[in-house]
Image: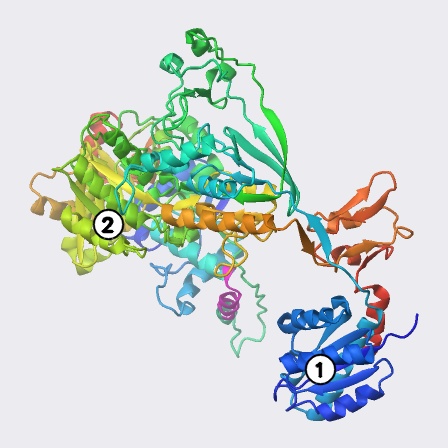
Amino acid sequence: MKVSYYPGCTLKDKTTNLDDSTKAAAEALDIDMVELPEWTCCGATHPLTEEKIINLVPQIRILSNVRTEGNDSVTTTCAFCYNTLKRANKAVIDDPIKRQRMNAFLKDDKRIPEYDKETVYDFKEYNGETKVVHFLEILRDTIGFETLSNRVTKKLEGLKVAPYYGCQLLRPPEEVDLDDPENPSILEDFLRSLGCEVVNFPFKSECCGSYLSLSAPDAATRASHTILRSALKNGAEAVTLSCPLCYYNMDKRQDNILKLYADFSTVPVFFFTQLLALALGVDESVMGWNKHHIDPTPLLKEKGFLS
Amino acid sequence: MPQKKIGVFVCHCGINIASVVQIEELVKRLQESSGVYYATDYKYMCSEPGQASIRDAIKEKELDGIVVACCSPSLHELTFRRTSSSVDLNPYLCEIANIREHCSWVHSDSTLATEKAQEIIETIVEKVRLDEALDPIKVPVNKRAMVIGGGISGIQSALDIADSGYPVILVEREAAIGGHMAELSDTFLTLEKSSELLSAKQREVSVHSNIQLLTYSEVEDLDGYVGNFKATIKKKAKMVDWDKCDGCGKCIAVCPVKVPFDQEHPLGKENAIYLPLLEAGPKRVVIDKGICQHFSGECSECQTACPKSAIHFDEQDETLEEEIGAVVVATGYSMYPKDRIGEYGVDGCEDVIDGLQFERMLAAWERGEGPLRRPSDGKTPRDVVFVQCSGSRDPEHAMPYCSRICCMYTVKEAMVYRKAVPDGQAYVFYIDIRTGGKGCEEFTQGGIADNRLIYMRGKVSKLYREGDKVVVWGVDTLMGKKVEIAADLVVLATATVPSPGAKELAQRLKVSADDYGFFQEVHPKLRPVESPTAGIFLSGAARAPMDIPESIMHASGAASKVLALFSQDDISHEPIVAFVDEDYCSGCGVCVETCPYGARELQGRKRVAKVIEVLCQGCGACIAACPNGACQQRNFQAEQCLYMLDAAL
């Protein structure tokens, strides 16, 4: 399949391991995934203010560019980017006034400078044609977990992984519509197709603390501790997720957790694409294990997935 | 046809009409108008002197028809039709010309308004000119009622009708009557045992000479109209000869099919063959064909075990046709399935139950079947959390309504629980305590204080299992604190929803259901026990969630409506109905498809369409649809309408 790829800002900085492993996995799965040549910030969060016009423009500009590239869908692995892009697109589809105003901005992008009389720009209205799909959706709906399980070269058998969703992948369900917001199963099915043992725990869609990491770090520490402790208690050896902010709160924050909760033992955190790339036998250099605060290599070596 | 003598009576309506329309000028013009024989005016036509002037004019001038130019016909048409029939002028020869709502109230230019009033009146004069003298259609009433549903509402409606001397068929789909009330422990306010209160009623039904009880039966179809319904009832095969069965229970002991505890099923049904719980009457078993393994496999264990050879697997369903005059729908309620509330669905955790299941547990304790035990491991629950509004008042679950009964039964359950487990603690999460009924608030406050119940105002966001506990995450909004309770048992007051199959039944009865599937009343304030279909009445929780006393009131209300219908030997029906000119009818059947009331049919041999006058509501759909103009409506005939148009334009 042919699809545009929107990485998002974090993947080019703090979590290049997510970016690299995504691209490598897509290549291994023969997905024709091309990064957009030009892209901007996705807005980071869906606007919460009443006036939702100007703060939807970046998302719509990105989606409109996907079409310019000749693709009809765009994929991303960052849960935040997925959430903002998908919701902005739905806002444009549902609301004709927003649609009109978005297009006024898009048209303005194409304004011909006074001095340039030669260039002819063709402006095409954007009406929500681009489909926003999470990389997990491609695995589930386009490739299929059964096919994926057959294509896996290195089964991650015996690895007990707790799937963690966070908020952005699932909510609000009427706009995001990826899976059941209360009892999701897409990550579980994904993990099973890699051969992992799924660890069920009650906090897989509880809040990780999100941006409280900046304003009230202790609250974020408490939140991530609740989640990780429950995962460990239920027998997890590792946690997997798709959101860079969750990743930060789960991985880096274990330092703070250890300071507050002496009985806590650390647990490695993987992006789901890292496990995917690993299972597909992709070259290890893309994994970026050195980016992890809690080093996952000892666990992987112990399990025999790394030499 | 000789010209009809038509009188026109113009009302001033105080200044309502007279301040805009020039009455004197109008009457003068009308007197000169060709079709008008007599015209006059009065300050208030609807007043007694006004009506007297109409009566006098009809007699003196020997009028053949009258037009009263006044307010809307919805206000005073009936008044003036009664006036004319009191002096032997057929009421259908009296018509209203609306010159208030359609003229004086909406215009200010006096000259133009007067012209318009004249045109309105002349239009109606044209109508009266060709109006026929009609008589109301009389239909005999079959004084026999059918009550659907044998819960407390159905029982009460059936008893009220039967006690008044009319025969009643009581149809219940389960094998025993009693409904949900048979499952309850103590009832609130008096804390009397529900089963004891009910058994008196059950006994009354079973011995009443006017009640024909059809258990294990379902209404398949309903045809006909008020006073003359025909019901098709399916009597489901019980597979057991009740003359031979003595309820020994040997068959139940060997049945391999186990019905799980939390499934919606009548009390006592633990296997595919079971003993319906009936306090009164003999004990007899029945087989549920749907889950019995004889029909899905080879099993015949119960047949072998039965010492009386009472089990016959070849017994077939039976279909009955019954003629009745009125129907009472008393299908009751059920509980919203708790696994549809994602945040409370703890992977099928057995210790999260709904209020009705807890009632059954408490009732078992009251019957002396041992201490209270929770479903998962049989431990006595020491910490019980009640969660009110589980699904109710929650638009996200498409149930924005209040289920009404939960506040009361929750406090009652918590009180009974404290009796059953004196050292246990009950916690209740609520949004509001809505206990508006007589004596209810006192009961609730007394119950909370006397039993040390911990009430917390707030919602529960999540339930999850930890070890053998169910952890409840909630919030106490009055304290402004998050609350976490490790409970042994969680009781969800899940929303009260219509009984399963209510929507399908509504379709079969051709009555409407509201957005949630409850049966729709004609008017929520003024006509709460009548369905929009004449002759079908609503009783109890089939219409909306309600508690036992309210259901009984409602049931008696529905019964009294049935009795009012039965007090007449025949009923009248508006004669403004469609009719067919058989010479023009080609028998194409378009009208039959068009009619929303089932009032049109093709006469087999003659191949012409017919109107069942008592069903016809005079909507005119078939008249518009008829390609030949063979369909016409009484007093709205095509010719008449054309003359009216001429006058109007």
State the residue at coordinates (82%, 65%).
B132
Q: Chain of mark 1?
A: B
| In this picture, residue B256 sits left or right of residue B328 | left
Hey, what amino acid is under mark 1?
Answer: Ser
Residue to which mark 1 is pinned: B53
Q: Quick one: label 2 or label 1, which is nearer the N terminus?
A: 1
The secondary structure type at the circle numbered 2 is: strand
Q: Is residue A103 magenta?
A: yes
Answer yes or no: are tags 2 and 1 on the same subunit.
yes
Where residue B594 appears, as percent x and y from the top left, is 74, 51
Residue B131 in the image: state x and y as whole percent.
81, 67
In the rendered image, the quadrant that contains the C terminus of chain A is top left
> Front-most of B539 and B596?
B539
Task: Rate crowding at label 2 as few (under 14), some (14 to 19) or many (20 or more) other CA atoms within 10 Å.
Answer: many
Q: Nearer the viewer, residue B486 or B135?
A: B135
- Image-based side of B112 in relation to A146, left or right: right
Point out the stretch of residues depicted in magenta: A94-104
Res B578 label: none
Residue under label 2, please give it: B429
Instruction: Give the total of numbered labels.
Output: 2
Secondary structure that dominates the magenta span: helix
Is A15 situated above or below A141?
below
Does A183 appear above or below B86? above
**Secondary structure at numbered mark 1:** helix
Q: Amino acid at mark 2?
A: Phe
Question: Which of the 4 quarters of the picture holds residue B384?
Answer: top left
Of A14 and B464, nearer the camera is B464
Query: Which of the pair B32/B588 is nearer the observer?
Result: B32
Which chain is home to disc 2?
B
Residue A267 visible in the displayed image: no
